[in-house]
Amino acid sequence: MNQPFLHLSAALDNAARRVFTHLRNERGDVPGWVLITLMTAGLVVAIWAVAGPALGGVFDQAISRVVKF
C-alpha cells in the first residue's frame, strides 16, 4: 500500500539531489549577465526617449475622455 509513495518519494529525492548538485556546481557568467542588464536598461531608456511624448499624449487623451463622463 505504501509502495507507490516510496517510489515517488525516492524519485523526488533523486531529482532534488540532481538539481541541488547542478546549482552548486554552476558558477554562471557574471560579465555576460551584467552586459545583458546594461544593454536592456539602455534599450528601455532609448525607447522611452522616443516613445515617451507619444505615450504621454495618449495617456492625457484617455484621462480627458474619462473625466468627461
Image (cartoon, rainbow, N blue to C red):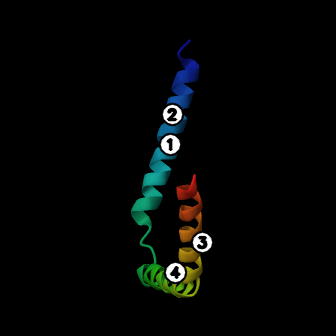
Position in image of residue 18 (x %, y %): 49, 51
Residue receiving disc 3: 58
How packed mark 1 is, by other alpha carbons closer than 10 Å (few <14, some 14-19, many 20 or more), is few
Residue receiving disc 1: 14
Position in image of residue 29 (x %, y %): 46, 78
**What type is the residue that disc 4 sits on?**
Val
Q: Is residue 61 above or below residue 34?
A: above
Q: Earlier in the sequence, mark 3 or mark 1?
A: 1
Is 20 on the left-hand or right-hand side of 52? left
Q: Earlier in the sequence, mark 4 or mark 3?
A: 4
**What type is the residue that disc 3 sits on?**
Val
Q: Nearer the viewer, mark 3 or mark 1?
A: 3
Q: Is residue 15 above or below residue 53?
A: above
Residue receiving disc 4: 44
Who is closer to the viewer here, 24 or 46? 46
**What type is the residue that disc 2 sits on?**
Ala
The quarter of the picture where residue 64 lies is: bottom right
